[in-house]
Image (cartoon, rainbow, N blue to C red):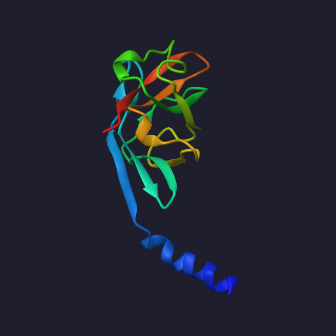
Amino acid sequence: MKAFFIALLFFAGPFIQQEILYKGEWEAESRRTTFKGSWKIVKNGEQYKVELGADFEARKAPDLKIFLSKASLSEISGKNATTKGSPVLVAKLTSYKGTASYNIPSGINVKDYSTIIIHCEEYSKLWGGSPLK
């Protein structure tokens, strides 16, 4: 019986409806930093994910992280990105070019946030972000 359910999940997996909650284009904080492309937040079953588009590109840095914030992008700077708007860490960026997917930790209600940002925590440098819409 257990094997049946595992097989069912394996074959049904591709047919589970993925819901796009938000999507947008990254807005770079500085013209001196490569940071561009698309992103979306999707819900797949009970799991929320940030998905970076094939056109995503960011200049490498030692400590780039994805955060969700309740503050608007215009209120966020490199110095306050980890404090302004009760930000929550989604994940450390592991890919600097092309598609990538990052699980949003369970317990985070994405609908409570208004902005997604990428920030270099080590050097307090905001790469940029985008409003959730």
Which residue is pictured at 51% across the width and 57% down the height? 46
Along the horizontal axis of the image, is 36 left or right of 124? left
Quadrant the N terminus occupies: bottom right
Which residue is pictured at 56% across the width and 75% down the height? 9
The residue at the far right in this view is 2
Along the horizontal axis of the image, is 110 left or right of 106? left
In the rendered image, residue 122, in percent from the top left (x then y), is placed at 62, 19
Query: In the rendered image of this protein, does residue 9 appear above or below residue 61?
Result: below
Query: In the rendered image of this protein, does residue 15 appear above or below residue 72?
Result: below
Which residue is pictured at 38% across the width and 16% down the height? 75
Query: In the rendered image of this protein, does residue 75 appear above or below residue 2?
Result: above
User: Is 106 or 32 nearer to us in this picture?
Assistant: 106
In the rendered image, residue 20, in percent from the top left (x then y), is placed at 36, 53
Along the horizontal axis of the image, is 25 left or right of 88? left
User: Is 116 or 36 nearer to us in this picture?
Assistant: 116
Quadrant the C terminus occupies: top left
For the image, the number of numbered tags is 0
Answer with the quarter of the image where residue 32 lies. top left
In the rendered image, residue 61, in percent from the top left (x then y), is placed at 56, 26
The residue at the far top in this view is 79
In the rendered image, residue 66, in percent from the top left (x then y), is placed at 51, 34
User: Is 16 or 122 nearer to us in this picture?
Assistant: 16
